[in-house]
Image (cartoon, grey):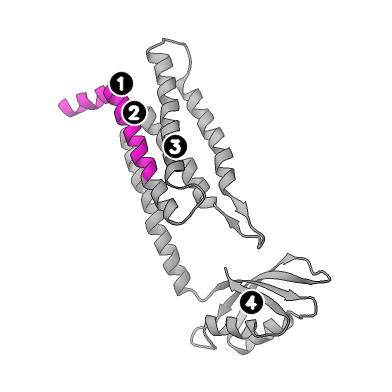
Amino acid sequence: MENMAWLSYLRELNLLSLTLRIVLAVFCGGIIGYERGKHQEAAGFRTHILVCVGSACTMLVGQYMVTVLGQNTDPARIGSQVVSGIGFIGAGTIILNSRHQIKGVTTAAGLWASAAMGLAVGVGFYECAIIMCIVLHFTLKRLNQMDDQYVKLTTDARIYMEYEKDFHFSQVVRALRENGWRIVFLEPVTEESAVGASVQFIMRGEEDKGVSKEEMLEKIRKMQDIWYIEEL
């Protein structure tokens, strides 16, 4: 009962609860931001802290307006604007590069989740915020390692290639087939022009047959009229 009384006290608006909520927002946002920063993402350590603390303060303002100032307003309305506004920040982290690769979606989702975590801290829902912080960290760090492990185990490889206009892509198809590989996906990145073109494709190797992925890429790289090739 004594613990519950302390928890109820910390859910009220007082100097101790204000300090705790801001510190907890910094801590939770920092944990998620540190993981993103290690991967050189656009939104890293400081950005996630700012988003989380800003969201927490937004909910604190709403709670203050109702409990202290006595205004007849819904404190959740202010918090709902955070969910809308974070979309603009998240959109800034998503880019489509020249090779038609979409980057930054995970970081944008992490920012959105950090904002929600900050709202939970701000309203005094400490249990939810701490559990959410643990789940987010596990998702971004541990599941990312599992994803990398899956990529290492699979034989699929996404390839980006640029070539001159005189080059016939059928040469690549033939070379892959002769070395135990096949194309399972093909997409032009730029249309063929007077200079050349670029494509993306996924090649899949048959188990225990043909050459390794690195050897296959080297064979394609040595073909005449190919400017550039890399695994994405």
Q: Residue at x 45, y 21 (%)?
A: 75
Q: Which mark is nearer the camera, 3 or 2?
A: 3
Q: Main secondary structure of the magenta part?
A: helix
Q: Residue at x 79, y 76 (%)?
A: 165
Above/below status of 220 relative to 35: below
Mark closest to the chain's N terminus, 4 or 1: 1
Check disc 3 and report its element: helix, strand or loop. helix
Helix, strand or loop at disc 2?
loop
Give coordinates of residue 224: x percent, y percent. 71, 85
**Which numbered disc, 2 or 1, marks the residue that appears first in the sequence?**
1
Circle 2/circle 1 CB separation < 8 Å:
yes
Residue carrying label 1: 12
- Amino acid marked by disc 4: Ile
Q: Identify the residue under disc 4.
A: 183
View extreme (right): residue:
194
Residue 136 visible in the current orientation: no
**Residue 182 position in % (x across, y down):** 62, 80
Q: Quadrant of the C terminus?
A: bottom right
Residue labelled with disc 2: 124
Looking at the rendered structure, the secondary structure element under dot 1 is: loop
1 shown above or below 156: above
Query: Which image quarter holds the N terminus?
Result: top left
Other-residue count near label 3 (Cα within 10 Å), few / some / many at <14 / 14–19 / ≥20 = some
Measure how far apart labels 3 and 4 are at the Cα level.
45 Å
Separation of residues labelled 2 and 1 (CA atoms) = 8 Å
The three-letter code of the residue at mark 2 reads Gly
The kind of secondary structure element at disc 4 is: strand
Q: Identify the residue at image location x=63%, y=75%.
A: 229
At label 1, the amino acid type is Glu
Quarter of the figure with residue 149? bottom left
- The residue beneath circle 3 is 50
